[in-house]
Image (spheres, rainbow, N blue to C red):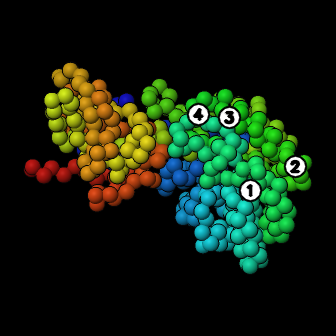
Amino acid sequence: MLDINTIEKLDRIATPFYYYDMELLRKTVDFVADLAERHNIKVHYAVKANVERRILEYISSKGFGADCVSGNEVLHAHSCGFPAEKIVYAGVGKTDKEIYNGLKLGIEAFNCESLQEIYVINEMARVYGLKANVSVRINPDIDAHTHKYVTTGLYENKFGISQHEFDKLIDIIKKSEHINFYGLHFHIGSQITRVSEVFALECCRVNDIVAYFERNGLKVDNINLGGGLGVDYDDPDENPIADFETWFETINANIVRREDQNVHIEPGRSLVAQCATLISRVLFVKSGETKNFLIMDAGMNDLIRPALYGAYHKIENLSAAQRTFFPTHQAYDIVGPVCESSDVWGAGRLLPLSVRGDLMAIRSTGAYGQVMASRYNMKDLAPSVFSDTLDEAPQVVDYFA
């Protein structure tokens, strides 16, 4: 929960907006940087989680690389301070233009996800007289025990290459004269909370796959284990920093690596989710026969996760922290203004008695919030407000004045 002084400042800012706790961001990133050095593991930030320039500039300043999934992410990451030689580019559908820009920029590696993609990159590199660093994304066929929409490492999936193609893949790489085989890339899913169990299983499966490729004549210099570490959406104050320590220790204890092999990971959500809160205001309180509704000025256009796959975000009434009256709690369906029935933040949430104008906090929104926002219903995009520059934010306009 935010302190009273901060809440008073936020209450003067026009809603909705994303509030970034820069102190928590720095603390999280610095902690991961220390673990990475201690365990000799290279970190690439998964840019798709949040592309806010101030966030990226701080992460890049700590020596992290960038994991990108589009050509524009590659260019944006580079403009935010990530060196080209620390940018890896994944994604199942890279266009010719995106591949060309990556080649000319000289990125660290393309993470290829199909055999045809390797053919195309090799041919384009030949045309321009270049050599492309290529990693191959492998499906290790592991159930990450997470939501079906964010499970990516099963045997048959649009992502990556499966075991039945290994021999053909090895043959293609050996024959591709304009490709440098950089290593193997894995990613089994997102929001993984069974940390020790799932990531130990991933490491054991990766060990077998790496050994297979090396027995068949491809030296694997880089092992990229992807990301997926989960965060605590239920109690962000109790666990503001994800369990990075267990993740790093699990990898270190289970991955088999030579001294000349590099191990990489790609955290995204776990670095940025808890540092942001979507701040909204109650527009109307609507009482029905069996339900009470709080109608907010932030909607699914600002944060689509709850509408898209039922994601849970903790919701707090910040205004209630400033008053001593209205002690009663009440169950509310908290909804947005968008003209869709799925525009619901939470059903039956128990909150202090709430009134029009109350300031509300939708927690843990630093990942997959702003990056997935839209202007559906022609709504304005919610801006960023930073904890260290609160006084610069646009102020509330009183239309009753």
In this figure, which residue is indicated by the disc labeled 2? 214
Residue 315 pos. (x, y %): 34, 33
The image position of residue 212, as x and y in percent, is 85, 46
Tell me which amino acid carries mark 3. Phe
**Which quadrant of the view contains residue 317?**
top left
Q: Does 229 sit left or right of 140 as displayed?
A: left
Cα–Cα gap, marks 3 and 2:
22 Å
Q: Are marks 3 and 1 in contact (CB under 8 Å)?
A: no
Q: Secondary structure at mark 2?
A: helix
In the image as oriented, which residue stretches furthest toward the top? 327
List the single residue furthest toward the left.
401
Residue 159 image offset from top left, x and y in percent: 63, 52
Q: Amino acid at mark 4?
A: His
Q: Earlier in the sequence, mark 4 or mark 2?
A: 4
Q: Is residue 55 visible?
A: no
Q: Amino acid at mark 1?
A: Ser
Tell me the residue at 38%/51% (across/down): 384
Instruction: Identify which amino acid the numbered label 2 is placed on.
Output: Glu
Counting residues from the start of the chain, the first of labels 3 and 2 encountered is 3
The disc label shown at residue 135, or none: 1
**Dot placed on the residue nearer the N-terminal end, 2 or 1:** 1
Indicate whether 42 appears above or below 74.
above
The residue where tag 3 is placed is 199
Mark 4 highlights which residue? 145
Depicted 3 relative to depicted 385: above or below: above
| C-alpha distance separating marks 3 and 1 | 20 Å
SS label for mark 4: loop
Q: Earlier in the sequence, mark 4 or mark 1?
A: 1
